[in-house]
Amino acid sequence: MENLQTIFEQAKELTAKGKAASYIPALAQADPAAFAVSLMSMDYQIELGDCSKTFTLQSVVKVLSFMVAANHHGIEEILKYVDVEPTGDSFNSIVRLESKNNKPFNPMINAGAITIASLLPGKSMFEKVKSVTQFIEKILGKQVYINNEVYLSEYHSADYNRAITYILQANGFLKSDVEQSLQVYLQLCAISVNTSDLAKIALYFATNGKNSDAVCSKEVINISKALMLTCGMYNFSGKFAAFVGLPAKSGVSGAIIAIVKDGEMEHLKGPIGIGVYGPAIDEVGNSVAGIEFLAKCSKHYDLFCL
């Protein structure tokens, strides 16, 4: 009978069909054959592959930044700056920023995430970054660090994101200056984690925060999960929702968090958090092996949430 280990091994074979992100030099150094998955319920954990390997959150942090900003300002205020509508555009597109409705479509694309970075609590760059790292630390129960090599690599290759940030400023959506907004965003993307950390973050969503001391309103958590389901997998989000059916958020490092509200997978029962690392990504920016693993798990264990 097919089980998690079998599904993992089958998915790992697909790493050959992707490649590590090349537009950020530090990420291009990742081993494209690497693949690891952690799965966590309230009382059990399963680890597949080298789950001790660290990597950066990249776009996975977008949903966490959104939660901190929304919990601080309130949803009504946040919606003045960033919408919650899906878009079929790439994560770094500037097309809609030049349209009549130039408000960023959602916090899961770069334009929305940079806007959210400017809205984070605190006046200085350090305070804004700390507001998110402290929230993550409360979820994980440990201190987290920024990978300075990755941050600097992203900063020195951030021409496209800098252009987005200037357009956001020109359109009146930034609450701090261009440089601060960009640096906060890039530092948060460079937070270092492992798959066990990702699974615990995913479990936070699956339990509506009951597995942690990190405080966030249920409304914000629910909206965040809805955003992950509709916008979390870049412009593959619609197909992922239709065929996998799990709220999830990916990053170009190969990281993915996926949320099972109530399921049963071998010894795991009830709310389950899944953390994936597979740096071989497709042309959209999602881990090739990670997508395959989650799709097979959803089908085999009947996890589809819709």
Image (spheres, grey):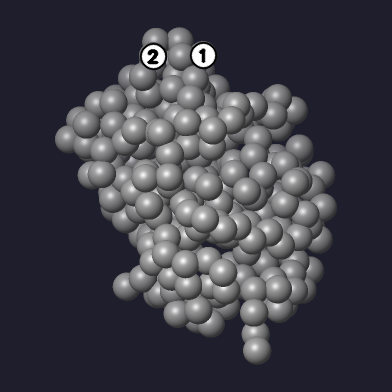
Which quadrant of the view contains residue 169? top left
How far apart in space, not on screen, are marks 2 and 1 (Cα)? 8 Å
Q: Which residue is mark 2?
A: 122
Q: Report the residue at 59% width, 30% height from top.
A: 142
Q: Nearer the viewer, residue 171 or 243?
A: 243
Residue 171 to residue 198: above or below: above
| Vertical order, 79 against 43 (above or below) | above
Residue 68: image tag:
none
**Which residue, as the protein is rendered here, is positioned at the far bottom?**
1
Check disc 1 and report its element: helix, strand or loop.
helix
* Amino acid at pointer 1: Phe
Determine the image quadrant of residue 159: top right
Question: How far across and how far down the image is residue 132, in percent?
Answer: 46, 28
Mark 2, other Cα within 10 Å: few <14 / some 14–19 / many ≥20 = few
Q: Quadrant of the N terminus?
A: bottom right
Q: Measuring 23% from the left and 44% from the top, which residue is drawn there?
A: 219
Toward the front, the furthest residue is: 43
Residue 256 visible in the shown view? no
Q: Residue sitting at 61 percent across and 70 percent down?
A: 293
Q: Position of residue 56 (x, y in %)?
A: 65, 39
User: In which image quadrant can residue 101 be found?
Assistant: top left
Q: Is residue 74 visible?
A: yes
Return the mark for residue 126: 1
Left or right: residue 258 versus residue 153 is left
Residue 140 image position (x, y, % from top left) = 54, 37
For badge 2, the amino acid type reads Gly
Instruction: Tell me where residue 163 appears, x and y as whole percent.
Output: 50, 31
